[in-house]
Amino acid sequence: MNERPSPLVDASAFAQVLLDLPVPHPLQYRFEPEHVSIARAGMRCVVPVGPGRQMLGIIASVSPECSIDERRVRTVRRLLDDPVLSRDWLQFCKFAADYYHHPWAQVALSALPPLLRVVPGPRAGARMTRLRRAPPPEATPAIPQTLLAPPLREEQRQAIDAIVRSRGFAPFLLHGITGSGKTEVYLGALTAALRTDSDAQVLWLVPEINLTPQFEARLRARFPQVRIVSLHSALPASERTGAWLAAHEGRARVVLGTRLAVFASLPHLKLAIVDEEHDTSFKASDGVRYSARDLAIKRAQLARVPVVLGSATPSLESWHRAATGRYTLLTLTPRAADAPEKASVSSVIRPAVQSVDIRQHPAQQGLSEPSRAALTEALARGGQALVFINRRGYSPVLACEACGWLSDCPNCSAYAALHRVGGDSAKPATKAWLRCHHCGWGRMVPRACPTCGNQDLRPVGQGTQRVEEALRQGWPTARVGRLDRDSARRADAAQETLARVHAGELDLLVGTQMIAKGHDFRGVSLVCVLNADAQLIASDFRAPERLFALLMQVAGRAGRAGQPARVLVQTRFPEHPLYRALAHGDYGEFAQEQLAERRAAKMPPFTHQALLSATAKDLPDALQFLATCRRAGLDLCDDGSIALYDPVPMPLARLASEMRAQLLVEATRRAPLHAFLESWLALVRTIKAPRSLRWHIDVDPMAI
Ligand code: ADP
Ligand code: ZN
Ligand code: ZN
């Protein structure tokens, strides 16, 4: 569609076809004579593979010659000329494939929307027409005042100006706490980008599917004439394909989506936005392990346009790049408390974060005395409170005190959590289950200890359900709600609970990080955080960074609309620098400390990493395979530019009955790392391994 015809078109009898097969390169096919003159790169096609099988492929390129024995070359069966994928899009997929060391074909095919990935049926043409039919124009309802553009603050105007005035590729890091007005900056930059020309397109990435409706409403209210599509994995296949085509054909001007939207075809991209850029959901955890944030930056670079990364707690990688001048830092300071008569929606008061030392104030049912007192006081004043605990279920483990039995998951090196089921907000649960949060294994709670027969099994520790129970017991007249993946199993249950909080129909809400993201609770005057330490002592070196982001986000839920709010964090380490920086609400202080530590310990962003992981039935198989890989690697790099660590079992070594091990590769510079990975993985592919063994490579891994 937006493709220049290749000068070779007339003579090109052969195609290099991208197929989802475990081969690193495109495969060659020949065209039927009637296809020769029309075939070109970017078309999809149907080709024979193996005996009697057909597959859908993408034509990567066409050429007059064939590089293998012509008699062995098979013929393209069908040529699909709608849509034609652009050269730019294919090149972007190629870049992602090279960077993440994954086959180009798999990247490109998995980047296509579902209906374009499969061999189309006989009536595909009619189906495409249906997909293209724009949805009926929505009646534009009266637009609520809150969705319209407020008069901008000077800082916001300057930020927008900087983005709009930039030329070519220009990365920006927009830093400001929740409610400081970042979204208004995105919207300002988006407005300007759409005005540059009548085809201009904007890519806007958000971390959570359940945040897209909220942004969509705000966008649609501002731009009733502009076609906005959303792209995420929960959309029905036809809708996702329709949205993808609308972007590809330039009919959609704004693409709002989760990480997979970074692979949208955007022929007229003028601006990319990555909101909550630090969020780990931008990194894919299976298949091609890409980072949508990093790929968005690459896309902006290829399209020579600005990209805005926004966050209250930027990733240390991005913060470091801003600190060293590679990104332009744009800062929105929270507005100090306005005089009460001037207090408006925009006035942000930083909540006061305090640590509660649970060595001095031991918790009962998860809640320490200062937390209880604060809850009572908040309720007495008619405010709402959030209780945050990052563990769902009733308790993380069930124990027999007589013999020491613990509720292990039979498939994982983890405990199965105790869950209550059957009850609801009013009546207590009738049944209890053990459930593993890693593999999904579950069973009814045994009547007696499976090893000694003792009937007195005790839940150990707290989960959201148990805290909910404690809140109901402690504050019997309060209206208590719970929000976690279990309570939100029904599609709109989460939205309902959130709406009840907004409407003031709930006084206390307990929940996991589901309550931390993207929702602002204006009536909330207190947030209690219960088990923060669990993450602080986790083995992953990024754990403090994540904890800080999470706690800032939790704290950011409260204290809006001019109301002062308190945040109480229960901890055993109140003097930890993380809690100190949190009390100051100072991300810069925290980032500086962390970066100094990372520099001293030679960790990212001061080094670059890749992780080779293997899973097998038996741990020794996985470890042995990785040891062989390591030896092969050592022979390749004797100049010391690459460090290959010893293979080790993963922190959760056994998952769903598979044993997992990993090998860390590190280098101080990126180029030698990629050159090494390229030749090393070629060797790794040839290493003999037990049949049950599978391996994958993760470049820039998020968890180690
Ligand atoms: P963030 O994205 O940083 O969380 P938002 O842009 O969503 O912040 O702003 C938070 C709230 O403040 C929104 O309701 C928004 O409409 C409002 N707001 C933002 N900027 C201004 C401003 N300059 N004047 C008044 N209200 C504003
Ligand atoms: Zn026992
Ligand atoms: Zn399990």
Image (tube, rainbow, N blue to C red):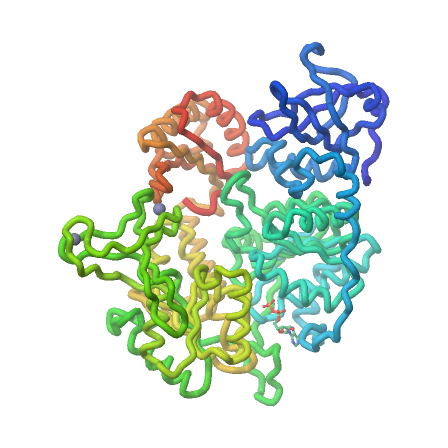
- Check the image and name the residue furthest to the bottom: 341
- Residue at screen point 44% across, 57% down: 545
Which one is nearer the viewer's eye here, 129 or 328? 129
145 horizontally vs 3: left or right: left
Q: Residue 96 sits in which quadrant?
A: top right
Image spot of residue 7 (x, y percent): 85, 26
Q: Quadrant of the N terminus?
A: top right
Out of 397 and 187, give the one closest to the viewer: 397
Determine the residue positioned at 78% across, 48% down. Answer: 132
User: Residue 158: which quarter of the image?
Assistant: bottom right
Residue 55: x and y in percent read: 65, 28
Which residue is depicted at the point 62% across and 86% down?
A: 342
Q: Is residue 247 left or right of residue 370?
A: right
Does 650 sit above or below residue 143?
Answer: above
- Front residue of 118/551: it is 118
- Counting from the top left corner in percent of width and height, residue 95 is at 64, 36
- Where does ligand 1 appear, by image quarter? bottom right
Is 512 situated left or right of 405 in this image?
Answer: right
Q: Is residue 566 visible in the rendered structure shown here?
A: no
Q: Position of residue 320 (x, y in %)?
A: 53, 53
Whether residue 458 is visible to the viewer of this picture, yes or no, is yes
Up-down relation of residue 40 to residue 649 (above or below): above
The C terminus: image quadrant: top left
Vertical placement of residue 638 versus 435, above or below: above
| Total number of numbered discs in the rendering | 0
